[in-house]
């Protein structure tokens, strides 16, 4: 897929929030972050893998300050307990479907063992981080199409150019009863001591059509009236939010920041339903924590608490825009047993609805 030709939400005249975007309006505007996908799309097989590399060195040897937050816990995420206990991330992050998390963990462990011969020998083990959403409506999730090789391919072929929509882990996902998937966005944060970036990548699989809102415009209500043949599903989905930044923060500050992703979700119409799993993982590239003990005390720079509001605004705006990008870049899919979901961009044109 040529990412340069994907029309994103701003191409439809929609500007979200007040802050400037990064150069690519992507999580990869945070220096060192790359993303890779493997897409499996054929008949009943509508699924895939998305890999996020937080930096290009050895994550095990140079860990990043990290934190996680559960908005609603209907999910099967792996690795978050240790992140919250130690405040660090030591592996890439893998996104996939619900029944492939075991395969993902196996592949990620293999990936880390190949690159770190000391694991399990002269040092401890490793904490693989895997997140999931359920793509069973469009994908035959029981068939478990994804293999360890697919995860390795995603990890080994990451790029600063992020494909969005019906790709990777987002291939079979739904959002607001339409086709969802992968979306990304970024914001620039200007402080007295420097300029920093907040980047977001989402895997969207949540919401019902009538709730969809774009910049305050009740687009979902208009579409619901137009698409009489579309049965609105009960919201039983999820959203995974990955937040990367180069802002110097402590894990406590980062946790406060990532909690504000909920403001971006809510502005698109989400009410965080009981059957939906909303999980956020955040990391900062500003400080690398060495795996091996040093003879000196560590110094971890962090912003002042009075500067937190700009980060709160940045993460909310970027989350909102990333969700909308996941919708507007998605393509119509016919999957398992003929189940299908239309694409927002097609419906806007068909029914002459303006955003």
Image: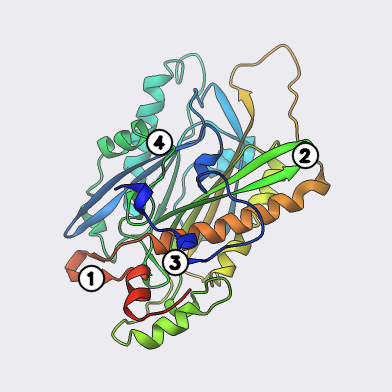
Q: Nearer the viewer, residue 152 or 267?
A: 267
Classify 10 Å Cα crowding around label 1: few (below 14), some (14-19), many (20 and above): few
Image position, residue 49 (x, y; %): 33, 45
Q: Relative to the observer, which residue lies in front, 180 or 12?
A: 12
Earlier residue among tags 1 and 2: 2
Q: CA distance from mark 1 to mark 2?
A: 49 Å
As drawn, the label of residue 339 is 1
Total number of numbered discs in the rendering: 4
Whether the residues at callouts 2 and 3 have beta carbons within 8 Å, the answer is: no
C-alpha distance separating marks 2 and 3: 34 Å
Mark before the other along the chain sequence, 4 or 1: 4
Q: Kindly report the distance in space between the C-alpha atoms of the residues bearing marks 2 and 4.
A: 29 Å
Q: Which residue is mark 3?
A: 206
Eye-nearest disc, 1 or 2: 2
Q: Which SS class for mark 1? A: loop
Q: What residue would you read off at disc 2?
A: 303
Residue under numbered circle 4 = 159
Disc 2, disc 4: CB below 8 Å? no
When the figure is inspected, residue 305 is found, relative to residue 275, above or below; the finding is: above
Indicate which disc, 2 or 3, sits on the residue closer to the N terminus: 3
Q: Residue furthest top?
A: 295
């Amino acid at each position: 897929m040529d990412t340069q030709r994907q029309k994103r939400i701003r191409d439809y005249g929609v500007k979200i929030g007040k802050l400037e975007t990064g150069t690519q309006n992507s999580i990869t505007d945070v220096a060192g972050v790359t993303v890779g996908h493997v897409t499996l799309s054929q008949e009943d097989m509508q699924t895939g893998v998305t890999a996020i590399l937080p930096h290009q060195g050895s994550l095990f040897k140079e860990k990043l300050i990290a934190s996680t937050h559960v908005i609603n816990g209907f999910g099967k995420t792996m690795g978050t307990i240790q992140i919250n206990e130690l405040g660090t991330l030591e592996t890439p992050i893998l996104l996939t479907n619900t029944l492939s998390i075991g395969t993902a963990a196996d592949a990620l462990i293999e990936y880390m063992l190949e690159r770190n011969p000391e694991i399990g020998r002269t040092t401890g083990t490793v904490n693989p981080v895997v997140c999931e959403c359920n793509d069973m409506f469009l994908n035959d999730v029981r068939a478990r199409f994804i293999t360890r090789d697919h995860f390795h391919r995603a990890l080994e072929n990451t790029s600063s150019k992020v494909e969005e929509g019906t790709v990777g882990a987002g291939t079979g996902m739904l959002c607001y009863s339409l086709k969802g998937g992968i979306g990304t966005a970024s914001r620039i944060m200007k402080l007295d001591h420097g300029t920093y970036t907040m980047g977001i990548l989402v895997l969207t699989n949540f919401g019902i059509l009538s709730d969809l809102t774009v910049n305050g415009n009740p687009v979902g209500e208009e579409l619901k009236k137009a698409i009489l043949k579309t049965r609105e599903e009960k919201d039983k989905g999820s959203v995974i939010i990955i937040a990367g930044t180069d802002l110097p923060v402590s894990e406590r500050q980062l946790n406060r920041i990532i909690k504000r992703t909920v403001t971006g979700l809510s502005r698109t119409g989400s009410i965080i339903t009981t059957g939906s799993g909303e999980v956020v993982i955040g990391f900062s590239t500003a400080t690398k924590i060495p795996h091996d003990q040093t003879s000196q005390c560590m110094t971890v720079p962090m912003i002042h608490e009075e500067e937190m509001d700009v980060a709160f605004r940045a993460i909310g705006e970027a989350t909102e825009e990333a969700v909308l990008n996941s919708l507007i870049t998605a393509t119509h899919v016919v999957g398992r047993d003929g189940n299908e979901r239309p694409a927002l961009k097609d419906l806007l044109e068909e029914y002459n609805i303006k955003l």
